[in-house]
Image: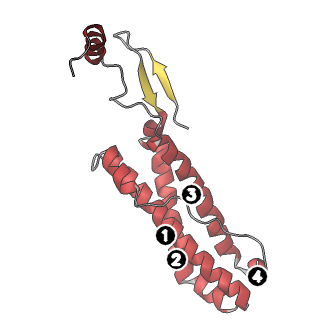
Amino acid sequence: MTQDVPMDSDDGRGETIDFGTRFANSETFRTLFREGMALVEETASYLDGPGRAESRGLSRSASLIYATESMRLTTRLMQLASWLLLQRAVNEGEMTQAQAGAEKSKVRIESPKSERSGPGWDEVPEMLRSLVERSQRLQDRIRRLDEAIFSDDRPDAEVAPNPVGEQLGLLTRAFGSDD
């Protein structure tokens, strides 16, 4: 998903724009951050209030689904919030992208998808089903952004042509090494 586009510059050298990093520093990211945090708050309010009351009247199978899905939902949102907070820290200069990458290894963006069928699923309150669906859409968006930012095919400074290294390589090949 990372796309690097050569751009002309005043000195005639091509520069690349890393769309993943640029997106992470954009208003679109800030909107995604606000949406993610709002979903965390909305979910917490629902599960602590109306959701608790709604879960009391469910059948045994629906109650089991409710408990399972609410735990998955909470875990998913905490992982996504952690990722968003890491990226915001990078955007605000509190940590480098490399530091965030190291910390990100502790964050699981992938989580089990919810089975939206089977006995009892239709009894699960509509609000919980909506929160699960919205959290999975948020997860998909963040996963795509994560791939764009942390993809291995991004250009690195070490991969860029090094004229001195190239000349040393030519000299070594021309004169051989005495190793």
Q: CA distance from mark 3 to mark 4?
A: 25 Å
Residue under numbered circle 2: 45
Residue 124: quadrant of the picture: bottom right
Q: CA distance from mark 4 to mark 1?
A: 26 Å
Q: Tell me the mark number nearer the camera, choosing from 3 and 1.
A: 3
- Asked if the residue at tag 2 contacts the one at tag 4, i.e. Cβ–Cβ closer than 8 Å, the answer is no
Left or right, residue 28 beside residue 66: left
- Residue neighbourhood size for the residue with mark 4, other residues' Cα within 10 Å, grouped as few (<14), some (14–19), many (≥20): some
Mark before the other along the chain sequence, 3 or 1: 1
Mark before the other along the chain sequence, 2 or 3: 2
- Asked if the residue at tag 4 contacts the one at tag 3, i.e. Cβ–Cβ closer than 8 Å, the answer is no
- Asked if the residue at tag 1 contacts the one at tag 2, i.e. Cβ–Cβ closer than 8 Å, the answer is yes
Q: Nearer the viewer, residue 144 or 126?
A: 144
Q: Amino acid at mark 3?
A: Gln
Secondary structure under tag 4 reads loop
Residue under numbered circle 4: 120
Q: CA distance from mark 2 to mark 1?
A: 6 Å
Mark before the other along the chain sequence, 4 or 1: 1
Q: Can the viewer see residue 58 in this picture?
A: no
- Asked if the residue at tag 1 contacts the one at tag 3, i.e. Cβ–Cβ closer than 8 Å, the answer is no
Measured from the top left, where is residue 153 in percent x and y? Answer: 48, 35
Q: Answer above or below: position of 71 versus 38.
A: below
Residue ranking furthest to the front? 179
Residue under numbered circle 3: 139
Left or right, residue 164 beside residue 29: left
Secondary structure under tag 3 reads helix
Q: Amino acid at mark 1?
A: Glu
Q: Nearer the viewer, residue 35 or 157?
A: 157
